[in-house]
């Protein structure tokens, strides 16, 4: 549990920064308009972002107002994460967006900005909040745990990277996107939904599978009519959770990006795997397999696409993960991966009240990347 209610604001001329637990109607309206990505690279919008906002968990919103108008938000999502046998409070940063006119008209690639630049007054409040994140925790049992914070940022998004640097975040690792595509995905007969009586054992298996990862959490793993498994001789040998996602892609770089935006939507077969204005796809979460059975993942990926009548699936991994390297060798990604490479992401990390020895352990391990957090 975390503290609720609106916190006192920080004022600077006509700017006002407030802290508020939960998203009110004004915050939801702001988030629904946010365009994500990096100018000159891939830029997109989550069509059903508000459908997910309740499931992400307790969220402290830092909100920026100018003359009473909401211009920016930063969400600090509280969750309990695991690192082997250790548990931590973690605050995951999401819903970071500041609309014009607060953004600088021209971004200058330098490490630090002038402290007096009021366009970035919100950073002072964020820095103040992240330094005292452990004080947000009111549950007595949770207060016994130490606290960290992390975020995912596109590698080329220099503005966000500079911002995170200013408030004390460092790079833990790099994220790579798996793009799986099939023009005519089919359902494989040995793939089925996980039964209710199998859920607890599967949760234990998934937790053990990612035991060498940082930031593992099971909050999004309901395994309720959305976890697919594949059997061999009556035994479950692989599985993954599926979620349907809809994006609107507004910009893609290069010649391949031009084709994806302008040619693919006009050709029925190509539109099946990539329709920029209405990009429907599935995500793969909590991918699990028994050693040597990773060969079945392609069938799971494809069946998930067929179940939702889409031609594209995505998953995200820390590139240091052995699970990722195993999947990379075992799965034929398909046509789209050969046409459009993914934009690498950075895992940014801030220790709040952990020891230097504990901090180094976070650097040694790959991070569990939730597909739900990425979409």
Image: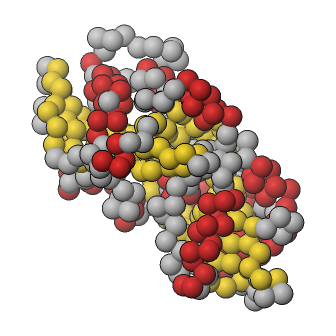
Q: x%, y% of residue 3?
A: 23, 46
Of 346 and 308, nearer the camera is 346
The residue sitting at 16% across, 37% down in the picture is: 7
Choose top left, top right, bottom left or bottom right for residue 51.
Answer: bottom left
Determine if residue 137 is in view. Answer: yes
- Residue 161 at x, y percent in the picture: 51, 28
The correct choice, above or below, for 309 with respect to 328 in the image is below
Question: In the image shown, does 54 or 363 lie closer to the viewer?
Answer: 363
Q: Residue at x 43, y 20 (%)?
A: 166
Between 367 and 187, which is closer to the camera in this rendering?
Answer: 367
- The picture places residue 245, in percent across and down from the top left corner, at 51, 65
Q: Is residue 64 left or right of residue 262?
A: left
Colour convention: secondary structure
Q: Count of labels shown?
A: 0
Residue in the image at 16% along x and 43% along y: 6
Where 105 falls versus 177 (above or below)? Answer: above
Residue at 43% across, 30% down: 352
- Please say if 285 is above or below 58: below
Q: Is 103 located above or below residue 218 in the figure?
A: above
Pick the residue in front: 254 or 341: 341
The percent coordinates of residue 50 (x first, y second) are: 35, 61
Side (left or right) of 19 relative to 373: left
Q: Is residue 338 visible?
A: no
């Amino acid at each position: 549990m975390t503290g609720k209610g609106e916190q006192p604001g920080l004022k600077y001329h006509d700017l006002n920064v407030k802290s508020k637990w939960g998203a009110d109607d004004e915050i939801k309206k702001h988030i629904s308009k946010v365009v994500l990505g990096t100018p000159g690279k891939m830029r997109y919008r989550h069509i059903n972002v508000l459908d997910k906002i309740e499931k992400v968990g307790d969220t402290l919103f830092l909100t920026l107002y100018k003359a009473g108008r909401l211009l920016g938000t930063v969400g600090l999502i509280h969750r309990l994460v695991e690192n082997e046998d250790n548990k931590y409070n973690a605050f995951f940063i999401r819903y970071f967006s500041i609309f014009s006119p607060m953004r600088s008209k021209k971004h200058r690639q330098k490490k630090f900005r002038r402290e007096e630049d009021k366009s970035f007054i919100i950073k002072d409040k964020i820095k103040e909040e992240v330094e005292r994140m452990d004080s947000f925790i009111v549950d007595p049992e949770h207060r016994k745990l130490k606290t960290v914070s992390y975020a995912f940022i596109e590698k080329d998004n220099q503005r966000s990277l500079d911002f995170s640097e200013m408030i004390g975040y460092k790079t833990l690792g790099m994220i790579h996107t798996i793009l799986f595509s099939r023009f005519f995905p089919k359902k494989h007969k040995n793939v089925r939904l996980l039964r209710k009586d199998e859920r607890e054992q599967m949760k234990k298996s998934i937790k053990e599978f990612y035991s060498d990862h940082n930031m593992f959490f099971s909050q999004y793993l309901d395994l309720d009519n959305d976890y697919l498994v594949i059997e061999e001789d009556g035994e479950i040998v692989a599985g993954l959770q599926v979620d349907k996602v809809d994006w609107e892609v507004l910009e893609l770089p290069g010649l391949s990006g031009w084709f994806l935006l302008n040619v693919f939507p006009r050709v029925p077969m190509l539109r099946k795997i990539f329709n920029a204005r209405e990009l429907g796809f599935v995500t793969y979460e909590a991918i699990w397999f028994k050693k040597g059975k990773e060969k079945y993942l392609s069938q799971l990926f494809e069946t998930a696409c067929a179940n939702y009548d889409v031609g594209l699936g995505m998953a995200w991994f820390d590139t240091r993960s052995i699970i990722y390297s195993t999947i990379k060798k075992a799965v034929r990604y398909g046509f789209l991966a050969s046409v459009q490479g993914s934009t690498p992401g950075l895992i940014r990390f801030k220790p709040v009240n952990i020891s230097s020895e504990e901090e180094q352990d976070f650097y040694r391990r790959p991070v569990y990347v939730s597909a739900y957090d990425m979409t």
